[in-house]
């Protein structure tokens, strides 16, 4: 077996070639350190008695798991050390966090633990990260400084904690996947240049919400379910892990479409997933892998955010399938 490229070597090479700010290489290294800590905490969760919920809610009013809090702390401890991070926003923080005394040029947004309802049942979960440039100087950093469209991300990715811990990231030059070697503690390049197959026959959606879906999604899913006998003239398979990161890792590996669309369940919510630390970073990675990410009506990365914790409809994955769902939305 040839010697594998480590995450550090990959980032250093990119920095030397002028494709990556060396300061960002350090930030990614620290995201790797936080991910390692979270992977270890997940593996020992029952033994260390950190399964279950804490007695508090997060900024979106959702119950926090002990591991949500632990994972959030891992990022808050790891990122300031880089000297490159001016501020942090997180699913688990009410406001944004200004790194004390920081002169760093970047803002990091995280979903520290994605799919946390899956932790107690020992199903894959993940961490999602998005990096934006801080406004000049970053002195007096305000919440509004985070409210940049996803197209302005300079780096984004996620770590999936499954049978293996895998970090997938992009800084605008394709998508690379790194597997954590538990023996050395290093992330090693195992999936260079990940590409989402354009044409696939697998879809992911929480079908228990079906009665609230809008007509374009009803039509798309009905046609998939009709299989060979329907207008698609082929059979489709369905998967729903309940951790976006795990569902998206599958898309990146063997293609498919993932949908958490707008529905009428709660008219006040335009979707379930959060724009800034779920849809934007995942959308960036998906586009970099040749796929598409849309709300059904517009490109996710073009949305001008109004709130750090705002929600959005998400339809992403293989190009042909997303284009079809978007066309159904246009047709009404
Ligand atoms: P989080 O655990 O960070 O709140 O995110 C969970 C998200 C996402 O990972 C997943 O795709 C979706 O919620 C699952 O929602 P349902 O439980 O409604 O299927
Ligand atoms: Mn999440
Ligand atoms: Mn989360």
Image (spheres, helix red, strand yellow):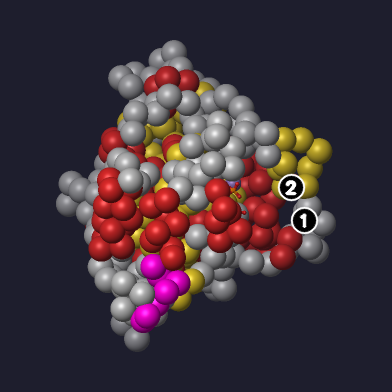
Label 1 neighbourhood size at 10 Å, few (<14), some (14-19), many (20+)? some
Determine whether the residue tagged by mark 2 lies in a helix, strand or loop.
helix
Identify the residue under disc 2. Answer: 66
Determine whether the residue tagged by mark 1 lies in a helix, strand or loop.
loop
The main secondary structure of the magenta stretch is helix
Q: Is residue 209 left or right of residue 159?
A: right
The magenta stretch spans which residues? 223-229
State the image coordinates of residue 100 (x, y, percent, origin top left).
Answer: 53, 23
- As rendered, which of 107 and 262 lies closer to the eye? 262
- As rendered, which of 316 and 108 lies closer to the eye? 316
What distance separates the C-alpha of mark 2 from that of mark 1? Answer: 6 Å
State the image coordinates of residue 282 (x, y, percent, origin top left).
Answer: 40, 51
Residue drawn at 45 percent across, 76 percent down: 237
Residue drawn at 72 percent across, 35 percent down: 57
Mark 2 or mark 1: name the one nearer the start of the chain: 1
Label 2 neighbourhood size at 10 Å, few (<14), some (14-19), many (20+)? some
């Amino acid at each position: 077996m040839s010697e594998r490229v480590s995450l550090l070597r990959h980032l250093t090479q990119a920095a030397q070639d002028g494709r990556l700010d060396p300061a960002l290489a350090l930030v990614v290294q620290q995201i790797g350190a936080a991910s390692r800590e979270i992977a270890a905490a997940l593996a020992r969760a029952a033994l260390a008695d950190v399964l279950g919920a804490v007695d508090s809610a997060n900024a979106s009013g959702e119950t926090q798991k002990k591991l949500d809090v632990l994972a959030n702390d891992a990022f808050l401890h790891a990122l300031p050390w880089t000297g490159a991070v001016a501020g942090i926003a997180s699913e688990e923080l009410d406001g944004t966090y200004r790194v004390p005394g920081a002169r760093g040029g970047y803002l990091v947004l995280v979903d520290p633990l994605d799919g946390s309802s899956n932790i107690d049942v020992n199903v894959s979960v993940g961490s999602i990260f998005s990096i934006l440039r801080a406004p000049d100087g970053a002195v007096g950093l305000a919440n509004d400084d985070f409210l940049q469209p996803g197209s302005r991300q300079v780096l984004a990715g996620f770590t999936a904690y499954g049978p293996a811990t895998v970090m997938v990231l992009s800084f605008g030059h394709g998508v690379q996947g790194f597997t954590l070697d538990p023996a050395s503690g290093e992330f090693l390049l195992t999936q260079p240049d990940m590409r989402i197959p354009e044409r696939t026959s697998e879809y992911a959606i929480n079908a228990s919400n079906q009665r609230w879906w809008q007509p374009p999604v009803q039509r798309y899913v009905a046609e998939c379910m009709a299989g060979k006998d329907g207008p698609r003239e082929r059979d489709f398979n369905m998967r729903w892990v309940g951790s976006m990161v795990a569902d998206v890792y599958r898309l990146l590996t063997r293609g498919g479409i993932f949908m958490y669309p707008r529905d009428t369940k709660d008219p006040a919510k335009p979707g379930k997933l959060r724009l800034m630390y779920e849809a934007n970073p995942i959308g960036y990675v998906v586009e970099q892998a040749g796929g598409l990410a849309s709300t059904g009506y517009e490109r996710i990365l073009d949305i001008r955010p109004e709130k750090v914790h705002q929600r959005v409809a998400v339809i992403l994955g293989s190009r042909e399938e997303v284009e079809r769902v978007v066309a159904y939305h246009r047709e009404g």
